[in-house]
Image (cartoon, helix red, strand yellow):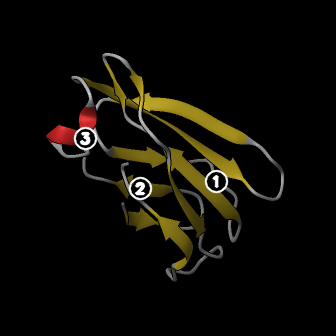
Amino acid sequence: MKITGINATSVTLEWEPPECAQRGGQLVDYPYSLRNMQSGQEVIGSVPRGLVTIGGLTPYTEYRFSAAYRNSVGEGPLINYSIRTDEAGTKKTKVLHWYAKWW
C-alpha cells in the first residue's frame, strides 16, 4: 500500500491485489474505512480495484485507513495504514505507521 497523493483535505491510496494463490476465490471488490483518530468520524465504502481518493478531511489530523479484499466466499484480512493530513497550505507528508500484508 502506498500514498499516491495527499494534501490538507484529501488522500489517495493505492494497493496491489493479493496473489492468486491467496485469494480463495474471485475478487469482487475492496471494502475500506478511513477513521479520524481525534473525532472518531469514519468514512466507509468499497472500490472495484485497489485505488481510492477520499476528500473532505481535516488538516493536520491523524487518520487510520483499513481495507480488505472481498471475494466470492467472503472478506480477506485487513490491511491498515495510519497517516496524518498536511497542515493547511503545506505540501509535507507524514506517514505515521503502515502495515500491509495479505495473509
Going 68% across and 48% down the picture, which residue do you hit? Answer: 35
Of callouts 1 and 2, which one flags the residue occurring earlier in the amino acid sequence? 2
Horizontal and vertical percent position of residue 33: 57, 40
Q: Disc 3 marks which amino acid? A: Gln
**Where does residue 28 sit, x and y in percent of width and height?**
29, 22
Q: Which residue is mark 1?
A: 57
Disc 2 crowd rating (10 Å Cα; few below 14, some 14-19, many 20+) is some
Q: Nearer the viewer, residue 97 or 37?
A: 97
Name which residue lies at 82% across and 58% down: 38
Amino acid at pointer 1: Leu
Do callouts 3 and 2 mark residues in contact (Cβ within 8 Å)? Answer: no
Which residue corresponds to the image point at 39% horizontal and 45% vertical from the top-left? Answer: 52
Q: Please say if 34 is above or below 10.
A: above
Residue bearing the label numbered 3: 22
Disc 1 to disc 2, C-alpha distance:
12 Å
Q: Which residue is mark 2?
A: 12
